[in-house]
Image: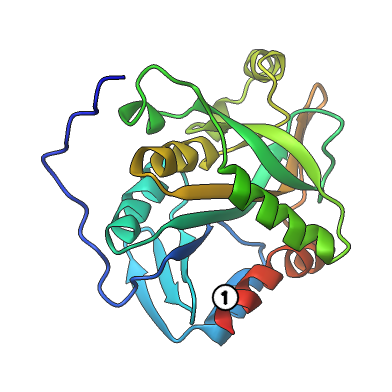
Amino acid sequence: MKKPEGSLVKAPAFKGFEQKTVLYIPADSSARVIEKAVQKRAEKDRELPMGHLYGLRRAVVLYGCIGAPAAVLALESLISGGAEEILLLGFCGSLCRRARLLDAVIVTEALSDEGTSQHYFPERRNFSPSLGLRESLEQTVRSQGHPLLPGAVVSTDAPYRETPSWRERWLDSGADAVDMEASAVFALAEFRGIRAASLLIVSDELNELGHNRAFNHPKMPEILQEYFLPFIREKAE
């Protein structure tokens, strides 16, 4: 395989946030359950143009930076600072009936319908999580007694162009759900030689009847506390 051409520009590290583990949390519930939990435990913080950095004792939390370009822009700088693994804890929209609202999906494959990953792997559209990190993430969730659904996601830059034909095309390609970051995060991690895995909560359903949202569902804060908070608490201790 031809060695990738080097870039003229190197991402600058975020000084003071040189940690091996990144918890990347693109979005939150309307009650901001995750942000409040992180702020309570953070030892330092830094505002970014499209998000926020929080320093825990044993990890950096990248909060915000929604979408593949913003995610990779910030993550490149964290990798420059020594990051070796990325845990993407986010949301997804279900494309099929097997993934229901508020289900937790452990991502087994990410298909690219976004424009960022092609700058790392021009000929590829499919990216996988790091097996060991995915298994560790899955073990943590199951040890808490919570159900988990393995599934493939397609990552898009244009959530308002998820048409019926778009949905059918990606269902035929094997996608169970849609998000905005996973394929780019996995591509970046592979390119830079680090690890990445993802756990997503189903916040939307896209089916033949239309669009059903659950961001404001009364059980959403409880779901986030069950699935995401253990990782935050672990890295804050």
| Residue 59 visible from this viewpoint | yes
Q: Residues within 10 Å of mark 1 (few under 14, many from 20)?
A: some
- Please indicate whether residue 106 sits to the left or right of residue 198 in the image: right
Which amino acid does the dot numbered 1 rest on? Lys
Could you say which quadrant of the image residue 204 lies in?
top right
Q: Is residue 113 above or below residue 90?
A: above
For the residue pair 56 and 203, the one nearer the viewer reads as: 56
Q: Quadrant of the N terminus?
A: top left
Q: Is residue 227 above or below residue 163?
A: below
Residue located at (82% from left, 58% from top): 142
Residue located at (81% from left, 51% from top): 102
Could you say which quadrant of the image residue 188 lies in?
top left
Q: Which residue is mark 1?
A: 235
Q: At which x and y percent is residue 19?
A: 39, 70
| Residue 31 visible from this viewpoint | no
Q: At which x and y percent is residue 104?
A: 77, 50
Q: At which x and y percent is residue 14?
A: 27, 68
Q: At which x and y percent is residue 64?
A: 48, 59
Q: Is residue 44 above or below residue 191?
A: below
For the residue pair 168 and 7, the one nearer the viewer reads as: 7
- Please indicate whether residue 180 sits to the left or right of residue 214 in the image: left
Residue located at (63% from left, 20% from top): 163
For the residue pair 130 and 200, the one nearer the viewer reads as: 130
In this picture the colour scheme is rainbow
- Please indicate whether residue 7 sits to the left or right of residue 186 in the image: left
User: Looking at the image, which residue sits at the far left?
Assistant: 8
Q: Quadrant of the C terminus?
A: bottom right
- Please indicate whether residue 197 sits to the left or right of residue 150 in the image: left
Residue located at (82% from left, 45% from top): 101
Q: Element type at marker 1?
A: helix
